[in-house]
Every structure is written in structure tokens, then in C-alpha cells.
Image (spheres, grey):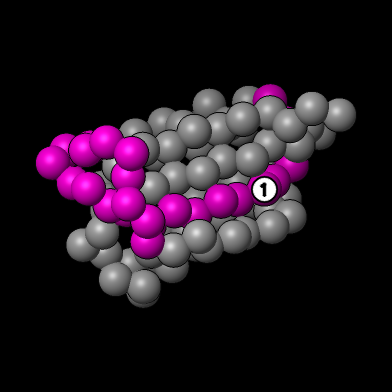
């Protein structure tokens, strides 16, 4: 199992419950795919460095997890089709 971290930026129109629902959805994808979530860190609403879809701010959420190499591909697919996610990235952590 490899260690990964992923961060996504949620649309600022989502309230705290909406961001929490997105976070739980992504945690579910990881856990149903055989991975384990080790840490979730809500960074809160921050100003973006540049506009994304005419939006200047977003809510950042960082998730650390461990999984097999196939799971990040599925998580990336889910990020892409989920409304409310402005940007995302998944990174393999070095040993």
C-alpha cells in the first residue's frame, strides 16, 4: 500500500454541510476501494491565486490516505464528475 495525499477545492457556494458531505463522499470512495483514510484536514475558505470558473475563493480540504495504486485513478474520475469541486490533485508521498 502506498501513501497518498489529495486536496480538493470546493465551490464557495457550498455551506459547511455541503463541504462535509463532499468530504464524506470522497472518504467513502477511498474506503470502499480498499484504502484507509489516515487524516482529514479542513483548511477552510481561502482566496484563490487566480479565478477558476469566474470564482475568486474556495474551501480547501486535504485528505491523507493509503491505498493500492489503482484507487487514485478511480478517485480522480469521481472528482471530475462531481459538481462543486473546482480543482483537485492527488500526490504520492515519498517514503
Question: Which residue is at a point 55% across and 33% down the rendered structure image?
Answer: 90
Is residue 15 visible in the rendered image? The answer is yes
Residue in the foreground of this view, choosing between 47 and 36? 47
Question: Image quadrant for the C terminus?
Answer: top right
Instruction: Assess whether residue 17 is covered by the magenta stretch.
Output: no
In the picture, measured across the screen, residue 68 lies left or right of residue 91, that is right
Picture coordinates of residue 33, whole percent (x, y): 62, 42
The residue stretch that appears in magenta: 45-69
Is 47 situated above or below 44? above
Question: Which residue is at a point 68% across and 36% down the rendered structure image?
Answer: 4
Picture coordinates of residue 92, whole percent (x, y): 68, 28
Picture coordinates of residue 36, whole percent (x, y): 72, 50
Find numbered disc 1 in the image and state the secondary structure of the residue it sits on.
Answer: strand
Picture coordinates of residue 42, whole percent (x, y): 52, 62
For this orientation, the residue located farthest to the right is 95
Is 13 situated above or below 2? below
In the picture, measured across the screen, residue 34 lies left or right of residue 44, that is right
Other-residue count near label 1 (Cα within 10 Å), few / some / many at <14 / 14–19 / ≥20 = many
Is 6 situated above or below 10? above
Give the residue pinned by disc 1.
64
Question: Image quadrant for the N terminus?
Answer: top right
Question: Which residue is at a point 21% across and 62% down the rendered structure image?
Answer: 13
Residue in the foreground of this view, choosing between 61 and 84? 61
In the picture, measured across the screen, residue 78 lies left or right of residue 89, that is left
Is the stretch drawn in magenta largely helix, strand or loop? strand
Question: Which residue is at a point 26% across and 64% down the rendered structure image?
Answer: 14
Is 88 situated above or below 70? below
Amino acid at each position: 500500500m502506498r501513501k497518498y495525499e489529495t486536496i480538493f477545492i470546493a465551490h464557495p457556494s457550498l455551506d459547511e454541510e455541503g463541504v462535509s458531505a463532499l468530504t464524506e463522499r470522497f472518504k467513502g470512495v477511498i474506503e470502499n476501494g480498499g484504502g484507509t483514510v489516515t487524516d482529514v484536514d479542513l483548511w477552510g475558505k481561502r482566496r484563490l491565486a487566480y479565478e477558476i470558473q469566474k470564482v475568486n475563493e474556495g474551501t480547501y480540504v486535504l485528505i491523507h490516505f493509503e491505498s493500492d495504486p489503482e484507487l487514485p485513478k478511480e478517485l480522480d474520475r469521481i472528482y471530475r464528475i462531481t459538481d462543486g469541486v473546482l480543482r483537485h490533485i492527488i500526490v504520492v508521498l515519498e517514503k
